[in-house]
Amino acid sequence: MKYFNDLRSYIAGLDALGDIMHVHWEVDGDLEPGAITRRSYEIQAPAPLFENIAGTAPGFRILGAPAALSSRADMPYARVAMSLGLAPTLTGPEIVTALADTRNVPYQKPLLVDPAGAPCRQHVLLGDEATLDKFPIPFAHDQDGGRYANTWGTLIVKTPDGRWINWSIARVMKVDGKRMVGLMVPSQHIGQIWTEWVALGKPMPYALVQGPAPAISCISGMPLPAEVDEADYIGALAGAPVELVKALTVDLEVPATAEIVIEGHVSIERDCMEGPYGEYGGYLGAGSSAQPTFHVEAITHRDDPIWPLVVAGRPTDESHTVWAIGIAADALSHLRDAGLPVTTVWAPEAAAVHWFLAVAPRDWRERLPGVTSEEFAQRVGEVLFKTDAMLFVPQIYLVDDDIDPTSLTDVVWALATRVHPTGRRAVFEDQRIVRLPQCYTEDEYVARRGPKVVFDTLQPQARPLHSSFEQAYPPALKRRVLDNWPE
Ligand code: MN
């Protein structure tokens, strides 16, 4: 399949599928792009490409919903799959498997190329010219604490000793043309690296990259283990090294085909207020907190740059597609490594990254001799709840493979009929939590500790047949019924 080396070729690929809505009429630069993008998620419309934004220079554009569900009902994961260089018709679980399998492909170090001629270096803004005010940065939601300057860009940071270069997506709010403020969670990779700079007493160099190759955005939005460079994994996924150029003013390398690169340093104090922001759980934010300042020192960009916009909220947006798929792939890798028999891990979009289903094959008892289903559920929790990615996930369901985990009808039916009101669950008390999942108490958020659970919904070895057309009738009769069915 085609690997898209920049955002523009990817947009052309979506356009060819009818999955781009060209917003050629003028929109305001405040709330309208957010409102259109949000509605686009909720009706599963083509991704809006805003070509005429009040208050910004002609040619500057915004792409909304870059990796949400596709408007093509026959290929709902087309945006995610194509972003990753996979076939647009892949199912969600097929993407999870492809991502988990890539963990075992030799990683490829990125390739440093000459910045002369690199698209990301077509325009260079320094000093007072390097201001965010030149770019279309709308409000995502009307209750947010500010305009969010990062909703889908890749934050590039490096440990002071240079051993680990992390690419991630985290929300960053615009303060003014020269300053941003970013949510710094200590347990996330960017927070771990920031903590090393704080210990040295030196501001942390960063690059914020808007609109690189879409695989870079997606993998930045997914968990990989600590001390792994996302660039190396993307090289394995793409089958070719990622091309980077030296940043202009900081000791970092940035993707050569990026639309916009913002460079500077992050303060080592939590010296600025961040938030609120309407998050992926589906509720408008409340409250703000002190977080470090991202100082803007240089900006480079392509001709007619495209700024990507994600508007988190009720399903389904990139949190529930890309991020959840990445957590599922990470979980599948960990369960495989632990030798536990699981065919896939899947997070139904509607559960807003709060529920993950681990699917057990029919023969799991042969593969785990002497293990009860309760013990199996216990082992799944022991493996997963200590991973960084599962920090965000309160509930796992261990389910049989007689249901399709991507079908909400199957999932609701199975959970309704197989979860005992009080029994058969492995509860893990006093786990690490963060304030992002919606289901905890204020005391638990303050303590950063709370319970997690694996529900054991596995059926007995002799599974009951479904009372369904598929399972309740002999094959010959089913064929006859289908053959005689009027068109
Ligand atoms: Mn990482």
Image (cartoon, rainbow, N blue to C red):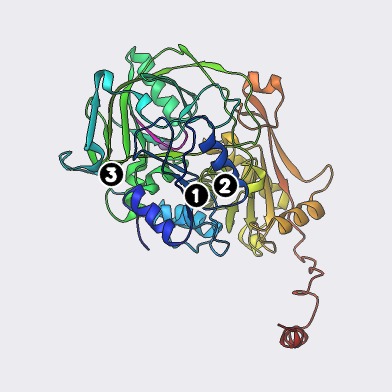
The first of marks 1 and 3 along the sequence is 1
Q: Amino acid at mark 3?
A: Thr
Pointer 1 with pointer 2, Cβ within 8 A: yes
Q: Amino acid at mark 1?
A: Ala
Q: Is residue 192 visible?
A: yes
Q: Give the residue pinned by disc 2.
A: 40
Looking at the rendered structure, the secondary structure element under dot 3 is loop
On-image quarter of the C terminus = bottom right
**Magenta span:** 151-157
Circle on res. 77: none
User: Observer-nearest residue: 462 or 220?
Assistant: 220
Distance from disc 1 to disc 2, alpha carbons, whole Å, reads: 7 Å
Distance from disc 2 to disc 3, alpha carbons, whole Å, reads: 27 Å
Q: Give the residue pinned by disc 3.
A: 257
Instruction: Give the answer, above or below, for where 223 lies relative to 272.
Output: below
Distance from disc 1 to disc 3, alpha carbons, whole Å, reads: 21 Å
Binning the other alpha carbons within 10 Å of mark 1 as few (below 14), some (14 to 19) or many (20 upward) gives many
User: Observer-nearest residue: 219 or 25?
Assistant: 25
- Whether residue 128 sits left or right of residue 230 in the image: it is left
Q: Amino acid at mark 2?
A: Ser
Snapshot quadrant of residue 414: bottom right
Task: Find residue 395 and report its horizontal and vertical position in percent.
Answer: 67, 41
Looking at the rendered structure, the secondary structure element under dot 1 is strand
Q: Give the residue pinned by disc 1.
A: 47
Task: Find residue 97 and report its horizontal and vertical position in percent.
Answer: 50, 57
From the viewer's perspective, is the residue at label 1 or at label 3 nearer?
A: 1
